[in-house]
Amino acid sequence: MKLLKKQEGFTLVELMVVVAIIGILSAVAIPNFKRYQAKSKQSEAKLQLSSIYTAETTLQTDYDSFATCLQFGGYIGPLNDNYYAVGFNTQDPGDVVANGGAGCGAAPGNTQGWPANKVVDGDTATVAELGANEAVGALENSFTAVANGRISADSAQRDIWTIDQNKDLTQAQDGVN
């Protein structure tokens, strides 16, 4: 008598169902993951603007004036792996130099802001673009600093955040959606 071996395995239909389920799950999960990843990059803007606020309030305490000279206030800018350009769009060093402060010149690019170093979809934010949508700068009794960056290849818009002398942090433009 000849015994037949029992064959075990998956049928083609079962495999196709599994592939379809994985495809549906990835179609839902990947866009959500990209959105959460972009939102997590916004913490960089908030951190840098908080540091600018601290530097500006230090200048206000020492010299009774805000200024665009962030280096003089102790702000050294982000490291080389930043998504946002941060600072002011003006080169006016404010009243701090007139009040006796020294250490900052009006040289563009190194006193009033720092450019972004990360490229997203071929686009990098620069300091010159900081004031494109908001009036930013520093006066004797007020300031508005800005962080401008491209953080998502899925969105054509920049992500723009501002902070002022009252520590009001606002999102001027959402670059995630």
Image (tube, grey):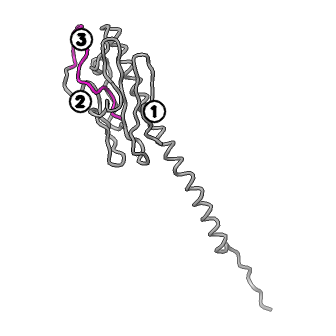
Which image quarter is the N terminus in? bottom right
Residue 88: x %, y % from top left: 30, 25
- Secondary structure of the residue carrying tag 1 is helix
Which of the marked residues, 1 or 2, is nearer the chain's N terminus? 1
For residue 25, which quarter of the picture?
bottom right
Q: Is residue 66 above or below residue 25?
A: above
Which of the marked residues, 3 or 1, is nearer the chain's N terminus? 1
Residue 12: x %, y % from top left: 64, 74
Please name the amino acid that badge 3 sits on.
Gly
Left or right: 37 in relation to 18 = left
Part of the protein shown in magenta: 83-104
Neighbours of disc 1 within 10 Å: few (<14), some (14-19), many (20+) = few
Do tag 3 and tag 2 residues touch (Cβ < 8 Å)? no
Residue 14: x %, y % from top left: 67, 70
C-alpha distance separating marks 3 and 2: 20 Å
Please name the amino acid that badge 1 sits on.
Ser
Residue on which the image places disc 2: 109
Label at residue 101: 3
- Which residue is drawn at the image coordinates 33% and 24% (left, top)? 136
C-alpha distance separating marks 1 and 2: 23 Å
- Which residue is drawn at the image coordinates 45% and 35% (left, top)? 42
Q: Among all residues in the image, which is located at the extreme bottom?
A: 1
Which of the marked residues, 3 or 2, is nearer the chain's N terminus? 3
Residue on which the image places disc 1: 43
Q: Is residue 68 above or below residue 158?
A: above
Counting the numbered discs, the total is 3
